[in-house]
Image (tube, rainbow, N blue to C red):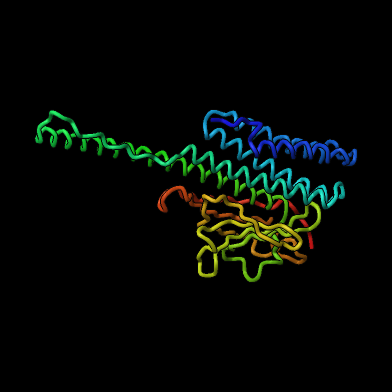
């Protein structure tokens, strides 16, 4: 039985934060009315709007799609508030409060997406065998009837389980494709907004790198890093491998990017050119770009299904000269 949208915890938190952002932006400078103020109010409002629209959708997949959008808008609002603090529009205390609440909201949205997926794909129940106790039948008749019943049930179960298996695999593939597109979009956005941090790489870049090192110049210079939690022996630190991201000056704590039902199987970055073309006296005139190879595995399925490999090449847009 539905508890109602107004009683949904993530909707109440999203709506509360939307009002808080609206009041907070009232003290922004007038010349930010159509920039930071408009952007923050739009993205904070989009969080609760997409939660409400997803809640009202009929199919589970439509609901999940809307909650993915709400998660992205929440992350955009969180980073927008962080930038506003760096520009002096709000205090560090207000920025910390917003960051804490939006981080909690994103975690709750992820939990609700997982809840919807469990509702969408419940564990199949094995049909019970019908009773074979029929008074009035002879022993031979009972055995023949039981044998026919068992054959029919086993045939039906085989067909049923194959259909369920195909459906589960399709759902796992859809889940991993959506998560892969979200992760790839996040990395691509950071590359285009910043630049490849050549100075932080040690040695030759002819070989693929297992960590992406970037510099972000949107406000103050900050480091952005992407890496997996694979150990030197090639094993994961936990029961699954995760993609991690950090941003700061310097880069500090890493946060997990992948959801709990996704495992990172491969992460390679090919950096071109292999040396910084913007260094004075450089002989290379190629614009820097990176090729990302990302392999993900769904933990909903067995180890031989629901795996996807994504590859994308993206160039940095930021240009500088040392």
- Relative to 237, residue 174 above or below: above
* Image spot of residue 37 (x, y percent): 82, 38
> Residue 119: x percent and y percent?
49, 38
* Residue 270 placement: quadrant: bottom right
Residue occupying the point 36% across, 37% down:
163
Rendered position, 135 above or below 287 = above
Q: Residue at x 48, y 52 (%)?
A: 297
Location of residue 67 by image quarter: top right
Q: Is residue 181 above or below residue 279?
A: above
Q: Residue at x 9, y 35 (%)?
A: 140
| Residue nearest the observer in this picture, 65 or 277 | 65
Q: Residue at x 28, y 35 (%)?
A: 156
Farthest residue to the right: give it.
30
Q: Quadrant of the C terminus?
A: bottom right
Labels in figure, total: 0
Closest to the observer: 319 or 231? 231
Q: Nearer the viewer, residue 210 or 283?
A: 210
Looking at this view, name the residue that lies furthest to the bottom.
203
């Amino acid at each position: 039985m539905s508890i109602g949208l107004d009683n949904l915890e993530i909707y109440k938190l999203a709506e509360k934060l939307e009002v808080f952002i609206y009041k907070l932006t009232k003290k922004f400078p007038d010349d930010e009315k159509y920039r930071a103020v408009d952007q923050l109010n739009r993205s904070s409002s989009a969080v609760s709007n997409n939660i409400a629209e997803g809640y009202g959708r009929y199919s589970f997949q439509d609901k999940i799609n809307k909650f993915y959008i709400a998660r992205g808008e929440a992350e955009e609002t969180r980073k927008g508030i962080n930038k506003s603090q760096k520009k002096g529009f709000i205090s560090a205390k207000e920025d910390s409060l917003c960051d804490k609440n939006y981080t909690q909201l994103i975690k709750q949205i992820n939990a609700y997406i997982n809840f919807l997926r469990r509702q969408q794909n419940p564990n199949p129940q094995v049909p019970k065998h019908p009773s074979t106790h029929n008074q009035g039948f002879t022993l031979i008749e009972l055995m023949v009837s039981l044998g026919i019943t068992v054959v029919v049930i086993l045939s039906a179960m085989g067909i049923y389980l194959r259909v369920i298996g195909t459906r589960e695999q399709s759902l796992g593939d859809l889940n991993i494709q959506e998560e892969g597109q979200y992760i790839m979009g996040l990395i691509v956005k950071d590359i285009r907004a910043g630049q490849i941090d050549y100075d932080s790489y040690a040695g030759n870049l002819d070989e693929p790198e297992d960590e992406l090192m970037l510099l972000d110049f949107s406000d103050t210079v900050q480091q952005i890093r992407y890496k997996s939690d694979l150990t030197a022996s090639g094993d994961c630190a936990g029961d699954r491998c995760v993609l991690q991201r950090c941003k700061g000056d310097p880069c500090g704590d890493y946060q997990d990017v992948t959801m709990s039902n996704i495992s990172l199987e491969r992460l390679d970055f090919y950096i071109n050119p292999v040396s910084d073309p913007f260094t004075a006296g450089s002989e290379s005139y190629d614009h820097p770009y990176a090729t990302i190879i990302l392999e993900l595995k769904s933990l909903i399925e067995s180890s031989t299904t629901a795996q996807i490999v994504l590859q994308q090449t993206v160039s940095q847009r930021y240009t500088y000269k040392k």
